[in-house]
Image (spheres, rainbow, N blue to C red):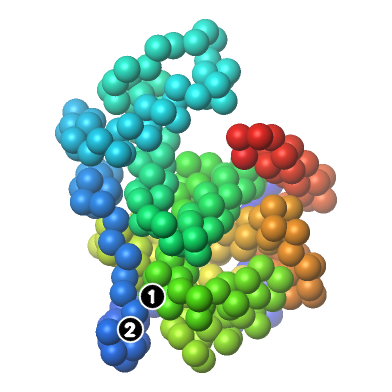
Amino acid sequence: RQLPNPPSDCTPLETVLTLPLYEAQLSRMGGKLTIPVLPESLTLLTHMVQQPHPNLQEIVRVIEQDPLLSGDILHTLRQPAFQSQLKRPIDIVSIHQCVNLIGFERLYQLALANGMKQLAGTDQLVKHLVGYAAKTAYACAEIAGYLPPQEHPLTQERAYLFGLYLHGGMFALAGSFGAAYAPTLKQSLSLPQTAYHYESQHFVAHDQLGVLVARQWGLNERYVADRLFLTAIAYHHHAHYECIQSSEVRLMIATGLLAQSMVNELVYQAYQSQELLDQAEKASHVIGLSDEALSNIRKNLSSYWLTPTA
């Protein structure tokens, strides 16, 4: 099977990253809004990933020089949940050993997730978003495992990373406005479009802001892979994203929105409003998932999140 084409009644949607416009919107907030900054080690890692031939030795060195980052990665791979996946338990003592065990892409996922945890500090609202982003990322990867073949497949690794980046704008809003933004964030679990319109009028739209956050975190629009991420973030609330010409951008948006819908329902027991149901149904159609695949995804996610380590 191939991914469904845009509907026949679509007007082809050209995607343009209007970065100066986003920056102007940010400046209009008069310094009330700040972009969260990841630890320097994460910025360096993101830059290294973008290279045609990443230097794994340099990557290991950067991680080892960050005690919090290296400690978190070692702790994660020493846990029973990871050890049970191995043929036999292994005494993990070095980051280089971690690279050999899980590969660089998964190591970078762990590093980015750790950097986001450091952003939260003691802020409970941002801590909530860290958990929300991690669960969305996991759901994105699960959905990607059921995608039909295509010319540029969205791998589970890329889907996971997209899920982490997708909430970047919300991180900035939560960190800047705190309790004032909390009701909007809560509303978005059941009424994503209503909350988005309110957010756009009273704060800054988190999709456009998310592009600036992702750039601050190291994504660069000059690289094709990063530009696809940034474009999908910028357009993930577009009313007709199913008409976007780039199949990979369409797919990323639909995967992210379906993942959000499932997280909101399965983890946060959000009220299943018509908005939320429509979001999930449209995303499933854009991806081309069968009812059986959707059922399997839901079962797998429910089983994972009901375990003590979820």
> For this rendering, which residue is in front, 125 or 284?
125
Q: Give the x, y percent position of residue 190.
A: 71, 71
Residue 151 visible within the image: no
Query: Which residue was labeled with disc 2?
Result: 32
Give the quarter of the image for residue 53.
Answer: top left
Secondary structure beneath disc 2?
A: loop
> For this rendering, which residue is in front, 300 or 2?
300
Q: Give the x, y percent position of residue 95.
A: 29, 25
Give me the residue at 74% from left, 43% from top: 302
> For this rendering, which residue is in front, 74 or 180?
180
Amino acid found under the numbered disc labelled 1: Ser
Residue 229 vs 204, above or below: the answer is above
Label 2 environment density (alpha carbons within 10 Å; few <14, some 14–19, many ≥20): few
Query: Which residue was labeled with disc 1?
Result: 176
- Quadrant containing the C terminus in the rendered view: top right
Give me the residue at 35% from left, 41% from top: 111
Q: Give the x, y percent position of residue 87.
A: 54, 10
Residue 51 vs 169, above or below: the answer is above
Give me the residue at 25% from left, 36% from top: 67
Tell me whether the residue at label 2 lies in contact with that at label 1, contact meaning CB atoms closer than 8 angstroms: yes
Residue 89 vs 254, above or below: the answer is above
Q: Give the x, y percent position of residue 244.
A: 53, 72
Give the quarter of the image for residue 309.
Answer: top right
The residue positioned farthest toward the front in the image shown? 122
Q: Earlier in the sequence, mark 2 or mark 1?
A: 2
Secondary structure beneath disc 1?
A: helix
Give me the residue at 33% from left, 88% from top: 29
Residue 259 visible within the image: yes
